Image (cartoon, coloured by chain):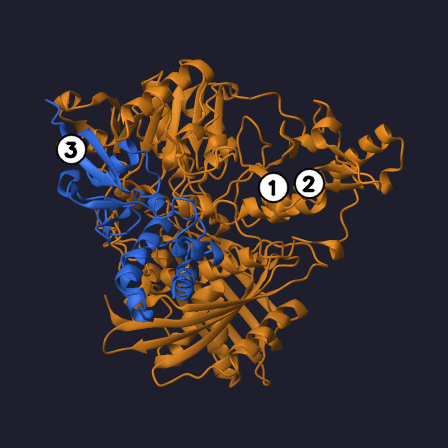
Amino acid sequence: MQSSKTSLQLSVNGQQYTLDVDPETPLLYVLRNQLQKNGPKYGCGYGQCGACMVLLDNQAVMSCLLPVSAVTDKEIVTIDGLAAIDGSLHPIQQAFIDEQAAQCGYCTNGMIMASVALLTRSKDAGEEEIRQALQTNLCRCGTQSRVLRAVKQAQESMQ
Amino acid sequence: MKNIARREFLLKSGYLSIGFSLLGCTQGSNAATPTPLGEAADFSLDPQMAPLPDGSRIDAWLQVLENGQVRVLTGKMELGQGLKVVMQQVAGEELNIPPQRIDVLIADTGRTQNEGVTAGSRSVERSAMTVRRAAAAAREYMKQLAAKKWETDADALELTPEGVKNNSGTILSFTDLLAGQQLDTEIPQDVSLKPKDQYQWVGSPVPHPDLEKIVRGDAVYIQDMRLPEMVHARLVRPPVYDARLQSRDQAIERMPGVLQIVENGSFLAVIAEEEYQAVKAADALQKSAQWESGTALPEVRSWADYMLEQGEKANHPAPASGNAHHAIYSKPYVMHGSIGPSCAIAVYDEERLHIWSHSQGVYNLRATVSDMTGIPEESIRVTGVRGSGCYGHNGADDVGGDAALIAVAFPGRPVRLQWQRSDEHQWEPYGSAMRMELSASLDNSGRINSWRYDLWSDGHSTRPRGNAGNLIGARLLAEPAVFGGSGRVGGGTRNSEPYYRIPKVDVSDHHVAGPLRTSALRSLGAYANIFAIESFMDELAKKAGKDPLDFRIEHSDDERSVAVLEALRDLIKSEPAAAGEGLGIAFSRYKNSASYCAVAAKVRVDLEQKKIRPLKMWAVLEAGEAINTDGLKNQTEGGMIQSASWTLKEEVKFDTQEILSKNWTEYPIIRYDAIPETEVVIIDRPDLPPLGAGESAQGPAGAAIANAVYAACGKRVRELPIERYLFGS
């Protein structure tokens, strides 16, 4: 069997990459392996848990099922692209630290990306809207009540 | 444009010349700060870095690095429970060094002491207390060294983060003081600890050192490790535990990137250059593989009935009538359900084997892999690296064994094996199903005067401790290792004795060899035992016509139990409950010897919509001396939410041919629409020894929810999960 690699352009955190990949490859594997991004995590591969979330044109999407060839015209942002150039954290990242809104932290990537997308489109989101935005993100340590507090704290600091 | 190929090239060249450091490929982090993975990726095939000092010596637990930084070495694992920050706090406190400046190295057979398994909420009680004593001894030793040098009295000196300081303000750095030596003296039996009233950091909510790295997307987890020349592997497991491989498509070897198919009996894995190539090849292999069907799984309608029919018989008469009360409770198999499927990396050079693993017991894994492969223990190193939260014995050890088998079949290059979601869901060892049967009678004043408790359970721990048969991979080999069984009930009896004053108590346990693979799940049998006992306490209180909280206090001998219950009463006393809402409480002392935890739950039950929404959960926790108050709160909040999920929603489903709960749709857990608000109060008792607290909320949280559901809708649900039994499946 022949390799089916093609050359693709990808824009991640404002940088352009030219990659030689199998176009079917889910974006997650390209980000983690070709671009050595640690943020998006493999959790289920079925789009059920949210650990692999990235921003695609400011929308939080799961990268585990999305073929890389489908996102060549999109602006992709990963969690390491959220901080400012000087290294200062995005208010959501800072709020997760302030509230210590994690235990094992494996789901934190998805929780933060979903929260960033929410507050970008709806900065005054209420309780139920926040919950709805995070509904696809699973956490097994049970830190969700802290995450809800962190999102509300970030909302205040972003006012 | 970034040139990825060049970065890879540099990494590989670095590997050839100077050995390997993962620091070079983390981005955005301060390269001067060692990252957990930077340490873990010390890519040495030497099983032991240097001879390990005896555990009675300071340098077994605490070392001064060349740059003057202090490092703690613990044989325990960071699981997300906050081990590292606690180690930083206790060591930093004794040394007068801010906790953030202490480096912590976790379990590694090449570098740390054998502290067994990170389990049972014992890491603070034991490892942290040893580190505290080692740090105090280090402080005194370095003061004495400086005193000798300055020809002064050690009592006139103090430790600062920069070194030992005398009263004229001169500082001698730790490195100058030690002059290339380590802290290689014994920890004195009578080492004097810092007086607790002088504490700056212990007892405070110090933040966890890894969280900033996590939110920045730095390399933190074993899943993030990338070794030079690393290849990727995926497994193809049988449809059910003991199905045997008959045939498979031989053409898979020719798929793009595939390097080797590892086939040994029914152990089947594919190795490829790239991860997604391994995924695709494993999918193709899965579709083509033919299996001889294994032992059929039973059809089970009720775990309460099944455990009674299949288990050892209770040999006492039927419950007494009269003023007696009798009830039967049950729980199904429940999974750990780590969000990140288990992962390991292994490399073998035809003599030595190095495994990176998120196992809770690196030494035990080493012994077990040795038993499986025949490689002597002295030639194997197992290095602990953070993984996804495990909550007990999940797939961590199995994947380490699998990676070892693959690496041995493919020597020379590091093999990264990531389990797929279905591997974790179908093959992890579950928390056992249980049946709990209670009867009790009340005296004329409404106090319990007799109590009988019978529990049925499979064993609760099959952790590998040197027998290859405890690893799934070893059981699938052409010459399969023999599994020694799950033991008789094991930790199923945890918290089966009521922690109440009752004149006559009779507790018996009955073993059931259940159909599914089991092992330690957070709190073992305590969750189901406390669910049953504390549900039953509410039923008895009602029968006695008493308030449930008063009823518990009335049966409590221990003032510390009373204190958490009274504090809980204060928290919820003005909490209103509307129609369809209910409040429930429960209490336990974990293991009847660790921390005290009282929980309240407020739920809304909508019988028409078939919905239960936990609105709020409260806990009061007393764990003796609180090292990290926020860490205790985090563990307790998380424990309540996890327990709410177990209690309301979870059960492993299977038919006669296979486990059906292969993913999160077929094994639903709690999501944000049902997350309660949480509030936790810590009662700090710095005068008392610290007590394990990471598992304390599991039992009382489950019972508090069941009691709240009863209060909300008048229905007593005794079989779990509540949503299935309240609404029908």
Which percent across, then down, holds residue B703?
Answer: 45, 68
Query: Which label was assigned to residue B101?
Result: 1
Q: Which residue is mark 2?
A: B161
Quarter of the rendering containing residue B350: top left
Kind of residue sitting beneath label 2: Pro
Secondary structure type for disc 3: strand
Local packing at callout 3 (Cα closer than 10 Å; few below 14, some 14-19, many 20+) is some
Q: Colour of chain B?
A: orange
Are labels 2 and 3 assigned to the same chain?
no
**Which image quadrant: the N terminus of chain B?**
top left
The residue at the far front in this view is: A86
Q: Quick check: can you spot residue A75? A: yes
A145 up-or-down from B47: above or below: below
Specify the subunit that label 3 lies on.
Answer: A
* Residue located at (30% from left, 22% from top): B6
Specify the subunit that label 1 lies on.
Answer: B
Query: Which label was assigned to residue A8?
Result: 3
